[in-house]
Amino acid sequence: MRPNIITEAGISTRLNQWWSSTPFITSGVTLICAAIYLACLLIGYDSYSEICFLPSAVASHFQVYRVYTSVLFHGSLLHVLFNMLTFVPLGTELERIMGSVRLLFLMFLLATTNAIFHLIVAFLVAYNPISPVSYLVDECSIGFSGVIFSMIVIETSLSGVQYRSIFGLFNVPAKWYAWILLVLFQFLASNVSLLGHLSGILSGFAYTYGLFNYLLPGPSFYSSIEGLSMLSACVRRPGFILCTGGTTYGQLPTYSNTSTAPSSLINRNFWRNISSWMPSRQTSTIQTSSTQEQEDPRFPGRGRTLASTGTEPTAREASANLHARHTNTVRADATVTADQTDTFDEELKKLVGMGFEKTQAEVALAAADGDPNVAIEILMSQQD
């Protein structure tokens, strides 16, 4: 009996550690989706036609609420379970890179753009003069998987890896990873929304190529949100990651600011011309010495968690810092310097001069928080 007790305790401990390491927004979205499904199950609610994303209803009756209600509702236990088990590692990784408020804004942006792409594709296919498929505008879609597909594309782009594993069975080129998943799910699962997943992939690629840059607010927006007194309880929660740590999102590499073609099927001049038409946000970094000292060493670069041990401030210091940022409109966190950007570019040129591919070098240097030695280690490990 003794080994069984130890094994059971080990499993519960591992689950507790896994959940406690999940950041604030990721765990919050997971709990909200699970609670909504459980509530629908208990009260017997199954009128998904009232809350699903229905292109004809959104276009004809302007029922915009469907864009967001459809994301939070799920049709079955396996549906919500599979989506949340896929979302937790993706959300955890992106939240630690971007910060909690920035990830929340990103998911809101992706849900909105996914719906727009869904509407455009559905009506183009339904009313094309050659072979119309009219049922697409009356197809009801629910679930978080569209946003998850967008996050898969973004996380794959930021990771800089060349290959991804499909269910641990075989590896595929990273640039085809999302597309292969799209096809596999259509064959392996029933009642899957092809347009919902396709729209998610399109939004993810549009984001990584910089086409949404004009929709992304600057660091001061996130700092002002974090400084709101009504959100002070959330900011102090374990796992909440500030967006003001390390370099800002403007430094995160996307294909729009590299000279490498995203795909052999797409002409690089085409993307260069598009990116030149798009308004670009100034790339800047936030220099806050106390923030940099408190970054989680496991995930350096952008966010810092308030739940890490060792170098985190005491409760009194955290409260004083939050109050000071709220009353002084985050003047300390809004100090922008051009020196760090110049240093980043210089180190990037050195890495490219050493023979590393520019996109991978930029990703590695951003993940290493500008430390060229750490970036070299990351690049070397990817080549092994």
Image (cartoon, grey):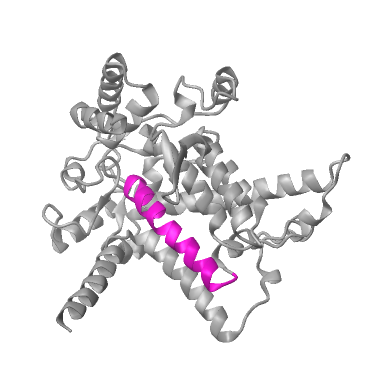
Determine whether, in the image, residue 173 is placed left or right of residue 92: right
Residue 298 shows in the view: yes
- Percent of width and height locating residue 249: 38, 38
Which residue is pictured at 67% across the width and 59% down the height?
64
| Placement of the C terminus among the 4 image quadrants | top left
**Taking 380 as reference, is 226 above or below it?**
below
**Taking 120 as reference, is 191 above or below it?**
below
Determine whether, in the image, residue 354 is placed left or right of residue 162: left
Which residue is pictured at 46% across the width and 19% down the height?
259
Closer to us: 384 or 306: 384
| Placement of the N terminus among the 4 image quadrants | bottom left
- Percent of width and height locating residue 172: 47, 38
Quadrant in the rendering for residue 162:
top left
Q: Is residue 81 magenta?
A: yes
Determine whether, in the image, residue 308 is placed left or right of residue 222: left
Residue bounds of the magenta highlight: 75-99
**Taking 227 as reference, is 78 above or below it?**
below
Residue 109 shows in the view: no
Q: Is residue 56 magenta?
A: no
**Of all residues shown, which one is farthest toward the right?**
129
Which residue is pictured at 73% across the width and 56% down the height?
55
Closer to us: 24 or 180: 180
Closer to us: 178 or 205: 178
Quadrant in the rendering for residue 360:
top left
**Of all residues shown, which one is farthest toward the left?**
310
- Percent of width and height locating residue 67: 63, 58
Q: Taken as a whole, is the magenta stretch helix, strand or loop?
A: helix
- Percent of width and height locating residue 367: 29, 37
